[in-house]
Amino acid sequence: MAVPTAAITAGSLIGGWQLARRTGIRPLGGAVLAAGGALAGREWARRTSPATTAALVATYVGAFGLSHPLAKRIGSWPAVLAVSALTAAVSWAAADRNAAH
């Protein structure tokens, strides 16, 4: 069974942020983000329509972008967890829910 894209997106958003934060090397976090996006994108393309795939990619990239201004308002951990949860929920609803059936 394939790894759910919800886990890939949430894991790469949280993991990329933590790697960048702990090492101080932002491109390392970006590499994790890009790898997660590529892996999830491949699965979305396989499981859904091109329009849904595009919407999911936009959600993932948008979540990353939203996390920065949100962190200034509510803090880094809450912001990353919030956008990760949102992205995971959208990924599950659009691509993972019916993948096992």
Image: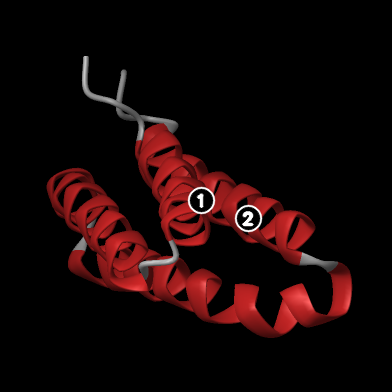
The image quadrant where one finds the C terminus is: top left
Q: Which residue in the structure is indicated by mark 2?
A: 86
Query: Residue flagged by tag 1: what amino acid is it?
Result: Gln
Q: Position of residue 84 (x, y in %)?
A: 58, 52
Seen in the image, is 100 located left or right of residue 12? Answer: left
Seen in the image, is 82 located left or right of residue 8? Answer: right
Sequence-wise first label, 1 or 2? 1
Which of these two is toward me, 56 or 63?
63
Crowding at dot 2, Cα within 10 Å, few <14 / some 14-19 / many 20+, comes out as some
Q: Callout 1: helix, strand or loop?
A: helix
Q: How is the image coloured?
A: secondary structure
Q: Position of residue 44 (x, y in %)?
A: 24, 51
The answer to which image quadrant residue 78 occupies is bottom right
Q: Residue at x 73, y 54 (%)?
A: 77
Q: Which residue in the structure is indicated by mark 1?
A: 18
Q: Position of residue 74 (x, y in %)?
A: 86, 69
State the residue lying farthest toward the front. Answer: 23
Q: Is residue 31 above or below residue 90?
A: below
Q: Residue at x 30, y 28 (%)?
A: 99
Query: Residue flagged by tag 2: what amino acid is it?
Result: Leu
- Give the Cα distance between marks 1 and 2: 18 Å
